[in-house]
């Protein structure tokens, strides 16, 4: 293009001066040569003014899992190979410098479902399941390959001091403030875990940002955005340094009812991730107004509202859950408003603060039977349930760099017991867990949840050839809460989840093994028990056992103090403490071998515990009042063989221990209770049947050993391979033990 324009301009100048004498022609051309370059550049379109541009990537992934020693939990997944691919494209059109139009398309291809056991033709125990091969890698809704991951379109308009864009579609990434719309992820980002969303980086940069000189905050790996489907508008440039954004979406992650009145979403497998064309019987409303350049600070006002369709109440699959509990159903609508401030108070002091109030609007319904005009027999009350008392939430983050080479970060949180903001950082998982009264291991330090107050302190000294970061946290429940404790598997959780045929990349299930049609495949510790026989409401039930999360696995149990509490359905309550200490360290020993190639010896370790009283440091499960204790360690040597080829090793260990945990085992012998079973257990009539309640302390140990490599085999193309040998042992219940091999390979090509 440049060559063509330059030739044309030169030809024009020469033609115009052709009538002159040869010497005069040369003088004329020479006199205008200085302006030829600028004239040519003025006719070119800039990078931001290309009429049409297409970019994106293609990814091909192969995963193989083999449980050569399997528990009942892996009965349907003893060996499986999955293959999937993704074409991600971004198309941008710029008719002029003031208007931009774009479309993002993601086309996934799922070729998975290759089992090497009998489940290749009958992957669940559902009698209605005809023998057919089912694609199970991405969803368990019996869909084939389809487009549902990211599809949206948008337009950007700019003019002077005005700039705005509007976008609509399946996946819209957005954030507002920590307590209204925000994602918080403080888990370490290991180089051994190649994320599905890794952006374009050469291998040397990937290893630098993950382990050689890791980026602790910011960037795609520390995504603060939430995903929504619907309509989003952002006035990013307004007079007086104002910004305004608004959104209309649907509460797909929080739907308590049914899709189109047909299929119950709560508790069902599926990955309808923000598709935007499904009716989730409700609406999300969001707005934010912010003022920038208050010095170096930004002040924002935020609102997030979630309102459900009243007709959900009339669906039998929803209201029958409440009938079993002996109470009338209700819908809980949520409204959250906050004011936040963020920016640099001084060049060396950063502050972020957010103060929020959440309000619950309870819509109550009453069963009046045949007197009702609705076939369900339910009628909306004569008035909507009263607006609840506003619940307070406060979050503060301060970062100081006043001490040279020693950044210090302090985070503080206060969340009242009933504070609820489902799309904020106060949700303990990327999956929105509804309104559950529970407490997570590492609460406050890694994940926030309501009913919490405390602080984190982090030191990150800077020195050559390595790093040494220390984080310490103490958090306590504001009021006594149910002793329902949850913890996630950090070492092997993602591989465990992905190897399950229940796995969905974005939509976790409530039972991790429900995709097998055998929800009791895993011998779980007892959770919240309802003697009436009900499991509770699907969106907030806490029956114990394994739960899937977004790319992770969780387990839940109740720390019962005696078996009688299990039988009576009496969940103990305490104001629990969370103690956390972690060390993330690494040192480059490349110079020991006389090479300028980086050889990083990196490790991460943490001690954490949940206790009834403060524990300055969680040393072991035998400490006074310790309810759950855990140690996690991972060692990752990484070597830069050549700039385009790096290798990493994986060696990890994780353990959890809790004394007060029980199991429920169904028995066929009918008795009214009190009859001895051997010398250890007693029959108890409950849950419309008879169960043996036995004490089964949690003493789990997981290990991982493996390696991986990352290779830029061509410009803008890479191969990423990982292997892990994993084990899990349960000292009290050996039936839960397993050993497995995990192999994953991905090639990603950018264009």
Image: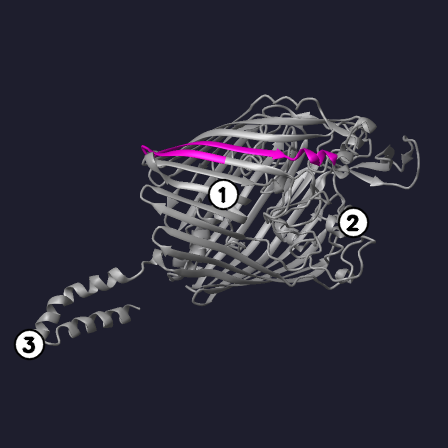
Q: Is residue 571 left or right of residue 55?
A: right
Rendered-image quadrant of the C terminus: bottom left
Between label 1 and label 2, give the one nearer the viewer. Answer: 1
Closer to the chain start, of discs 3 and 1, is: 3
Q: Name the secondary structure under disc 1.
A: strand
Q: How many marks?
A: 3
The answer for how far apart the CA atoms under marks 1 and 2 are is 41 Å
Q: CA distance from mark 3 to mark 1?
A: 65 Å
Return the mark for residue 232: 1
Which of the 4 image quadrants contains residue 312? top right
Contact? badges 2 and 3 (CB < 8 Å): no
**Does 423 sit above or below residue 144?**
above
Q: Which residue is mark 3?
A: 23
Callout 2 crowding tier (Cα within 10 Å): few <14, some 14–19, many ≥20: some
Q: Is residue 659 visible?
A: no
Q: Which residues are magenta?
A: 287-314
Q: Which residue is mark 2?
A: 518
Q: Earlier in the sequence, mark 1 or mark 2?
A: 1
Inter-mark Cα distance, 2 to 3: 95 Å
Name the element at disc 2.
Answer: loop
Residue 736 appears in the figure: yes
């Amino acid at each position: 293009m440049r060559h063509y324009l330059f030739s044309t301009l030169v030809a024009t100048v020469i033609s115009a001066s052709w009538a002159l004498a040869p010497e005069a022609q040369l003088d004329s051309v020479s006199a205008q040569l200085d302006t030829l370059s600028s004239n040519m550049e003025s006719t070119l379109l800039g990078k931001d003014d290309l009429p049409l541009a297409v970019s994106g990537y293609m990814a091909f992934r192969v995963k193989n899992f083999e449980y050569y020693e399997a528990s009942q939990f892996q009965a349907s997944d003893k060996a499986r190979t999955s293959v999937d691919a993704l074409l991600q494209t971004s198309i941008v059109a710029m008719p002029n410098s003031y208007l931009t139009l774009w479309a993002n398309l993601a086309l996934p291809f799922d070729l998975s479902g290759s089992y090497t056991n009998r489940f290749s033709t009958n992957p669940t125990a559902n009698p209605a399941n005809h023998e057919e091969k089912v694609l199970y890698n991405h969803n368990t809704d019996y869909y084939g390959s389809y487009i549902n991951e990211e599809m949206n379109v948008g337009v950007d308009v700019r003019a002077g001091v005005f700039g705005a864009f509007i976008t609509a579609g399946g996946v819209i990434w957005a954030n507002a403030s920590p307590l209204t719309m925000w994602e918080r992820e403080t888990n370490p980002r290991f180089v051994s875990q190649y994320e599905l969303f890794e952006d374009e980086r050469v291998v040397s940069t990937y290893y630098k940002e993950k382990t050689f000189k890791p980026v602790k905050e910011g960037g795609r790996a520390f995504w603060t955005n939430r995903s929504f489907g619907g309509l989003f508008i952002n006035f990013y440039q307004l007079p007086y340094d104002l910004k305004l954004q608004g959104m209309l979406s649907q509460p797909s992650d929080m739907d308590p009812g049914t899709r189109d009145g047909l299929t119950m979403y709560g508790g069902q497998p599926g990955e309808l991730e923000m598709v935007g064309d499904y009716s989730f019987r409700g609406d999300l409303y969001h707005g934010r107004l912010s003022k920038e350049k208050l010095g170096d600070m930004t002040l924002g006002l935020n609102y997030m509202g979630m309102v459900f369709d009243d007709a959900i109440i009339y669906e039998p699959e929803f209201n029958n859950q409440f009938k079993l509990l002996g109470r009338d159903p209700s819908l809980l609508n949520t409204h959250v408003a906050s004011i936040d401030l963020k920016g640099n108070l001084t060049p060396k002091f950063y502050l972020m603060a957010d103060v929020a109030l959440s309000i619950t609007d309870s819509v109550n319904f009453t069963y009046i039977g045949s007197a009702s005009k609705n076939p369900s027999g339910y009628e909306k009350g004569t008035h909507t349930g009263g607006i609840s008392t506003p619940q307070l939430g406060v979050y503060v983050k301060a970062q100081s760099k006043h001490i040279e080479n020693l950044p210090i970060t302090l985070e503080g949180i206060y969340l009242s017991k009933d504070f609820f903001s489902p799309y904020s950082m106060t949700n303990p998982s990327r999956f929105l867990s509804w309104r559950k009264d529970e407490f997570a291991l590492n609460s406050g330090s890694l994940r926030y949840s309501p009913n919490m107050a405390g602080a984190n302190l982090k030191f990150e000294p800077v020195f050559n050839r390595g790093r040494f970061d220390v984080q310490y946290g103490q958090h306590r429940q504001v009021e006594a809460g149910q002793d329902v404790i949850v913890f996630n598997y950090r070492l092997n959780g993602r591989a465990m989840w992905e190897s399950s045929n229940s796995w969905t990349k974005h939509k976790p299930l409530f039972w991790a093994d429900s995709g097998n049609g055998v929800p009791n495949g895993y011998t779980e510790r007892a959770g919240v028990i309802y003697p009436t026989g009900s499991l509770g409401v699907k969106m907030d039930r806490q029956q114990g056992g394994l739960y899937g999360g977004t790319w992770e696995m969780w387990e839940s149990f109740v720390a019962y103090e005696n078996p009688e509490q299990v039988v009576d359905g009496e969940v103990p309550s305490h104001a629990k403490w969370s103690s956390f200490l972690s060390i993330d360290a690494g040192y480059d020993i490349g110079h020991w071998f006389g090479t300028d190639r980086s050889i990083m010896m990196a490790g991460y370790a943490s001690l954490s515990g949940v206790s009834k009283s403060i524990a300055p440091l969680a040393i072991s499960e035998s400490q006074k009042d310790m309810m759950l204790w855990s140690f996690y360690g991972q060692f990752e040597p990484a070597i830069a063989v050549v700039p385009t080829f790096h290798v990493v090793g994986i060696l990890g260990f994780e353990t959890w221990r809790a004394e007060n945990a029980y199991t429920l085992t169904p028995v066929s012998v009918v008795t009214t209770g009190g009859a001895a079973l051997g010398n250890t257990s007693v029959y108890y009539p409950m849950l419309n049947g008879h169960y043996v309640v036995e004490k089964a302390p949690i003493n789990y140990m997981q290990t991982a050993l493996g390696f991986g490599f990352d290779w830029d085999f061509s410009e803008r193309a890479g191969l990423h391979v990982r292997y892990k040998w994993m084990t899990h042992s349960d000292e009290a219940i050996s039936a839960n033990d397993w050993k497995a091999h995990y192999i994953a390979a991905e090639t990603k090509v950018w264009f």
